[in-house]
Amino acid sequence: MTGNPRVPAPRDTFAAAAGGPCVLLKHGEVFLKGRNRHRFVERLHDNLRIALRGIGGSTWIKGAQNVTVVGGEVPLEALVERARRVVGFHCVEPAVRTPSTMEDVTAAAVETLRVVCAERRVRSFAVRVRRRDKRFPLTSSEMAVHLGARIQEAVVGLPVDLTTPGVTLSVEIDHRETYLSWERHRGLSGLPVGSSGRALVLLSGGYDSPVAAHRAMRRGLACDFVHFSGAPYTNAASVYKAYALARELNRSQPPGELHVVALGPAQKQLAVAGAGRLQVVAQRRLMVRTASALAARTGAEALVTGDSLGQVASQTLANMVAVDEAARLPVLRPLVGWEKQEIIDEARTIGTAEVSVLPDEDCCSLLAPPRVSTRARLPELRSVERRLEMDEVIEALLASAQVLRPGEDGAAPALGEGCPAPA
């Protein structure tokens, strides 16, 4: 999501005419919930408060019927940008608020359209009214006609176009306040992060796993991350990428931790044990075993990967089954049916593509054989694994893991020994 919304006038203009600017946030799937809807709304508001931290001024949040309203002593465009990153809102609309009286709503509507026309060229307009307060003296359609007539009187020569208007003024009449908006931005929709539990994402430096993580968040999962590097046999480029990706993803959730595990020595042990064509699948099994053990410590209830069925040799159905057998938790694959171009397009949309495209040394290619088995058999994999003390290997990996907190500040990760900076 890029670009800032056009704000028709400075804050003080609307503050005098309509009681002040705000942002109207329409709920996504939350409105479908029944008796426990309030719990989802509370989680949504908690996440919004976290997203507003450090914005540079005081803010306020209030709830209404299937909407949330946010405002404060900060620029309107800053509120919109922060709100658009909170999972659970279907639409984000810059707005002004005014008391729900005929006089106040009419004055605010006229002033809003007058300012919009002064800010940019508007060829036509339409008014859409939604009356939540049925005690209001006019029906929605009657109020729309009334406001349209008053606007045309004030802005001479501006025609009404109900089919393809140049600007649509949306008016939502609630019991005490009415909200008038002139722009609509797509939100992330989905369920509030944290409402479905916690997951641990196996985060590489490519396109797939960050998109999978973002999709998991939109289904209500709060995510921590684990990145397996090839250190000490590879440089730290992939770690820097994973950190940057986690920091970007954390902008859409209460920040999760990034665990960095140097897998290189264990990969070499698998190769020495004679993994051969099974090397890549054996490495994946080791990753999910390690991630499962880490999840037990972080409270995660599932693992998330960026696997897409058939995309590469290690992601055939047979190999996925072999990997799952080694996991102690459910392995979720949000992208299992996606094509590569779909994943890349989504990465561009959520803002991770620019990082994913950077070069690095992927641990999965370390010690990989010329030909990877597309149908690894469990007896053969177990035979290789029996030549290693797997519990000791996993314990050693977790003992040396680094824990980073992307998003808490702008600093780059401080890498330990065996993780040289990229050239």
Image (cartoon, grey):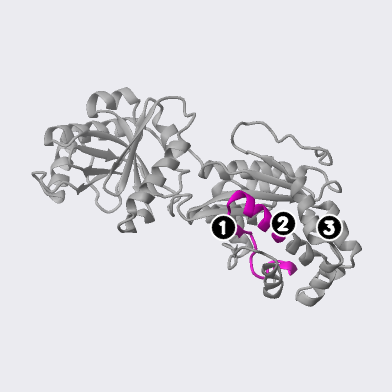
Along the viewing direction, whichever of 247 and 322 lies nearer the viewer: 322
Residue appearing at x 40%, y 35% in the figure? 6
Amino acid type for the residue under numbered disc 2: Thr
Picture quadrant where residue 244 is located = top right
In the image shown, does 116 or 289 lie closer to the viewer?
289
| Residue behind mark 2 | 290
Query: Residue visible at 85% across and 46% down?
Result: 232
Density class for disc 2 (Cα within 10 Å; few <14, some 14-19, many ≥20) is many
Contact (CB < 8 A) between labels 2 and 3?
no
Cα–Cα gap, marks 1 and 2: 14 Å
Q: How many other residues sit within 10 Å of disc 1, few (<14), some (14-19) or many (≥20)?
A: some
Going from the N terminus, do you reach mark 1 or mark 3 first?
Answer: 3
Separation of marks 2 and 3 at Cα, in angstroms? 13 Å
Kindly identify the amino acid type of the residue bearing the numbered disc 3: Gln
Magenta stretch, residue numbers: 288-315
Q: Residues within 10 Å of mark 3 (few under 14, many from 20)?
A: many
Residue 202 in view, yes or no: no
Side (left or right) of 57 relative to 272: left
Residue 339 in percent (x, y) is at 61, 65
Answer yes or no: is residue 95 visible. yes
Indicate which disc residue 205 carries.
none
User: Earlier along the polypeptide chain: callout 1 or callout 2?
Assistant: 2
Pointer 3: what residue? Answer: 267
Q: Secondary structure at mark 2?
A: helix
Q: Which residue is mark 1?
A: 301
Q: Position of residue 140 (x, y in %)?
A: 16, 49
- Looking at the rendered structure, the secondary structure element under dot 1 is loop
Quarter of the image with the C terminus is: top right
Q: Which three-letter amino acid code belongs to the residue tagged 1?
A: Glu
Residue 261 among those drawn in magenta: no
Q: CA distance from mark 1 to mark 3?
A: 26 Å
